[in-house]
Image (cartoon, rainbow, N blue to C red):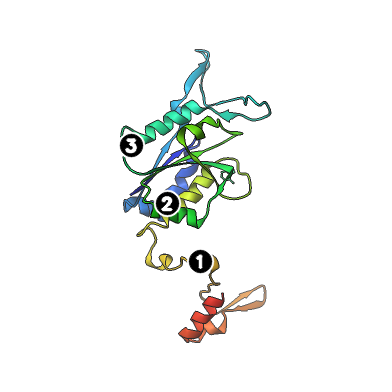
Amino acid sequence: MLTFHIITLFPESLTSYIGESILSRAQEKKLIKIKVYNPRDFAEVVGTPEYPRLKVDGRPYSGGPGMVLLPGPILRAVGKARGKTKTGKWKTIIFSPGGTVFTNAYAKNIIDKKITDIIMICGRYEGIDARVKKILKAEEVSIGEYVLTGGELPAMVAMDSISRQIKGVLGKFESLEENRISSHEVYTRPEIFEYQKKKYKVPAVLLSGDHKKIEEWKRRG
Ligand code: ADE
């Protein structure tokens, strides 16, 4: 069983995707577990008695716009995730656009190494106080060379990609298409699809019943 511990200020942004289809089935089958922790629940109360507020961010020492997430609430959330037991093989990831680029190989490696728990820390605003990375010996991971508004989508992308590498998560059909990246076009009914007065046909080879030729067509992709 692989447990994902997601640290996010916006837990609700994850719920609909996690609750759907394959990731939901994988949880039911007890192949994965997803736990979500909000640093806000571990924040200190500041302000006045009349207007108390939970402090999760602060202005950067370097100046400039934007706010930086405080180390305390995040580290306390991670502490809760880790619990009393330190058993198992843990990995801690901080999502950030400047990190190591996430790939299929990265996902496979997590399964091959028999990691049991992954802590995924989602950043927001200008980033997370750099001491969090040092203290947790975390790895910074990016899902591509573009900047998103937070780490929640990257966490879901990585969780989806890692989960599908676990035996039993995908159905028989889906698991056969590991080569999808380099793979072929696919077609279904009807044989001739008409769109705006033009006819679009399924390639003849696919209707030929000649399996050898079909395999060759797929390989050429
Ligand atoms: N946070 C903002 N942009 C990101 C990206 N591309 N990958 C990971 N985390 C991010």
Q: Visible in this render: residue 186?
A: yes
User: Does 210 sit left or right of 195 as displayed?
Assistant: left
Q: Is residue 139 above or below residue 58?
A: below
- The residue depicted at 53 percent of the width and 72 percent of the height is 186
Q: Quadrant of residue 37?
A: top left
Point out the frontmost of discs 1 and 3: 3
User: Does 124 sit left or right of 40 as displayed?
Assistant: right
Q: Amino acid at mark 3?
A: Lys
Q: Which residue is mark 1?
A: 180
Which x, y percent locates residue 159? 45, 49
Res 86 label: 3
Which x, y percent locates residue 88? 33, 43
Q: Amino acid at mark 1?
A: Arg
* Mark 2 crowd level (few <14, some 14–19, many ≥20, 10 Å Cα): some
Q: Quadrant of the C terminus?
A: bottom right
Sooner in the amino-acid sequence: mark 2 or mark 1: 2
Q: Which residue is mark 2?
A: 110
* Mark 1 crowd level (few <14, some 14–19, many ≥20, 10 Å Cα): few
